[in-house]
Image (cartoon, helix red, strand yellow):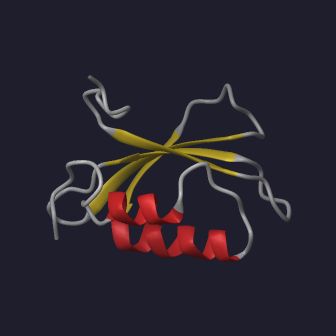
């Protein structure tokens, strides 16, 4: 059986709703490594067909930004609880910290 994250790269898909001039955004967030760094690929509704932007950043910093987005009323297709677990390495096989 598959848990929905069975691909080789193991990414959490996170769709952020449009709000206050910010376009709808799709993020594919990798599993945090032992140093607390995640790799993120993202697309914007401004041009879904464009190549994804890619970056590596601290999971804690990404979580803080996502929590601010949620507090501002931006919708997410994943619960903030699930995102917290993922970015803390507790929800998808990531390295615990």
Residue at 85%, 60% (x, y): give it: 21
Query: Would you identify the image quadrant in which residue 96 lies?
Result: bottom left
- The image shows residue 35 at horizontal and vertical percentages of 18, 65
Q: Is the residue 6 above or below the residue 67 in the image?
A: above
Depth check: 45 or 67 in front?
Answer: 67
Q: Is the residue 97 above or below the residue 10 in the image?
A: below
Outermost residue, front direction?
1
- The image shows residue 54 at horizontal and vertical percentages of 46, 44
Q: How many numbered marks are there? A: 0
Depth check: 91 or 37 in front?
Answer: 91
Query: Would you identify the image quadrant in which residue 36 lies?
Result: bottom left
Query: Would you identify the image quadrant in which residue 66 lies?
Result: bottom right
Residue at 64%, 29% (x, y): give it: 50
Residue at 25%, 60% (x, y): give it: 89
- The image shows residue 64 at horizontal and vertical percentages of 49, 76
Report whether 6 appears left or right of 19: left
Q: Which of the image's four quarters has the N terminus?
A: top left
Q: Which of the image's four quarters has the C terminus?
A: bottom left
Q: Is the residue 2 above or below the residue 30 in the image?
A: above
- The image shows residue 48 at horizontal and vertical percentages of 69, 31
Q: Is the residue 89 above or below the residue 3 in the image?
A: below
Depth check: 49 or 87 in front?
Answer: 87
Depth check: 54 or 70 in front?
Answer: 70
């Amino acid at each position: 059986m598959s848990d929905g994250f069975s691909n080789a790269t193991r990414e959490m898909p996170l769709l952020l709703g449009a709000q206050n001039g910010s376009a709808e955004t799709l993020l594919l967030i990798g599993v945090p490594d032992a140093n607390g760094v995640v790799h993120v690929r993202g697309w914007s509704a401004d041009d879904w067909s464009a190549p994804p932007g890619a970056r590596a950043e601290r999971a804690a910093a990404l979580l803080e930004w996502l929590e601010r987005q949620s507090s501002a009323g931006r919708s997410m297709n994943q619960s903030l609880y699930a995102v917290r677990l993922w970015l803390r390495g507790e929800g998808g096989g990531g390295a615990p910290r």
